[in-house]
Image: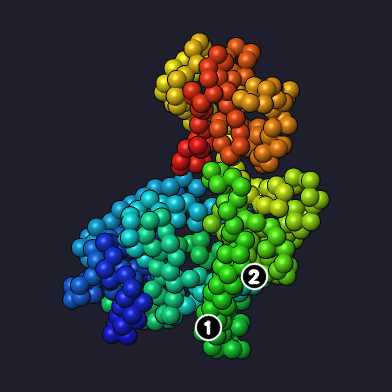
Amino acid sequence: MTPLLSAKLLHSLAPWRDAPAWHVAFSGGLDSTVLLHRLASLAKTDALPPLSAVHVHHGLQVVADAWPRHCQEVCDSLGVPLRIMRVQVQPGASLERVARDARYQAFSEVTGIGEVLLTAQHRDDQAETLLFRLLRGAGVRGLAAMPVHRPLAGGHLVRPLLDVSRAELEAYAHQHALTWIEDPSNADPRFSRNYLRHRVFPTLTERWPQAVTTLARTARHLSEAQGLLDELASIDLRAADQTSAFPWLPLPSLALAPLRELSDARQRNALRHWLSPLTRLPDSDHWTGWHSLRDAKGDAQPLWRLADGELYRCDERIWWLPATWSDFSDASVNWPDPQNPIELPGNGWLRLTGRAPEGPLVIRYRQGGEVIDVPGRGRRDLKRLLNESGLPGFVRGRLPLLYQGEQLLGVPCLAGLWNTALNAAPGDWHVHWMPQTCDQGLS
């Protein structure tokens, strides 16, 4: 058993043998105890990255208060450094989910650039995940279950035991006389995974003894299918990834016309791929929001609200607006020293180049009816100028306007917008806006 498990581990971890460090997510349960013990043993004979363990204490059960001490004793016996992290689990509709979110947030804090966090999910866990998500109506991405590898913070999360059964781990633990924690909550059938583990899978394997292996293999097939869908999405998105008329605006956006040419299924596939790093994705019933946005009239500016932001359509382009985009104050801001950039609450920075106008300056936001002197064009209505520029509506409300008293002196000089100076020649100064979500000035 030991040589076979060692071979499987070293094969799974071969791509990360040169990582700066390996951290084992160590709950103290059977699975992570076997993983930590085997890696600590291998480290004595093989050249492995520095090994450490991380125990996350959720504080959800009184009995759990003794677990950090047990984990410390195990790590001391193996000569492995242990970091104990205590997290606050916020109440939520699913205790399992919020505890998992808190746990992985802690793991993200531990995992440095290029480092690897190792978790001990095994083949039986993979089969349970597939069946659980199937019952929830997941798509291909969800049914691919747990990937062997995914990015985590600046490093990697790796599951090297997905090809190992729980029976193999139990046999190893007994062979080496290991002790581990039995979490009482793992026997509570009120939790969906426990119900599958203790009620459903025994019945399945009684009739189909290879059910766990077969389901895990199905997850691998679906993972491969998802990879092909991702490749197709990348092809479709390349056609839609056209430079906008406002390249200074640092928000993800796509041209709508190339997406319209795709079938509905390919549109959804491309958008899932594009949106997945930005927001939690909607379920099947909520994709009607995409159809409403896509099919709205040309002069409409529809929104599709998602979990972590909004998809906004302006003309024939869609823009992603994170939830933080609208989190700014439209209160006036005094600018006592225009020689230095000024921070706008929730709206980035404003700076002025050239010879600054004399007298006190104030930053305000649009109220309607603004008029500005445009060099060579005379007095012009700001709304009409903005319409001529085609500036997306979601930008206009947070466009900083430079005033001296009640006189509108200028707006940021970006892509067809204007500034003017009272009692100064055109070109003497310019206003530049650097929005909160932008990493470069808008010039």
Residue at 62% across / 15% down in the picture?
407
Residue at 53% across / 20% down in the picture?
425
Residue 245: numbered disc: none
Residue at 62% across / 19% down in the picture?
408
| Viewer can see residue 270 | yes
Residue 340: horizontal and vertical position, in percent? Answer: 41, 23
From the image, tell me which residue sits under label 2. Answer: 139
Residue 185: horizontal and vertical position, in percent? Answer: 51, 61
Q: Secondary structure at mark 1?
A: helix
Q: Mark 2 touching mark 1, by CB under 8 A?
A: no
Q: With 155 as the anchor, is 386 left or right in this view? A: right
Asked where in the image residue 401 lies, by quadrant, the reply is top right
Viewer-proximal residue among 306 and 148:
306
Asked where in the image residue 74 lies, by quadrant, the reply is bottom left
Residue 358: horizontal and vertical position, in percent? Answer: 49, 12
Q: Residues within 10 Å of mark 1 (few under 14, many from 20)?
A: some
Residue 341: horizontal and vertical position, in percent? Answer: 44, 26
**In this rendering, is residue 46 above or below 425?**
below
Q: Amino acid at mark 2?
A: Gly
Q: With 224 as the anchor, is 31 left or right in this view? A: left
Residue 217: numbered disc: 1
Q: Secondary structure at mark 2?
A: loop
Viewer-proximal residue among 135 and 401:
401
**The residue positioned farthest toward the left in the image shown:** 45
Q: Residues within 10 Å of mark 2 (few under 14, many from 20)?
A: some
Mark 2 to mark 1 CA distance (whole Å): 17 Å
Q: Earlier in the sequence, mark 2 or mark 1?
A: 2
Q: Amino acid at mark 1?
A: Arg
Residue at 41% across / 55% down in the picture?
153
**In this rendering, is residue 308 above or below 406?**
below
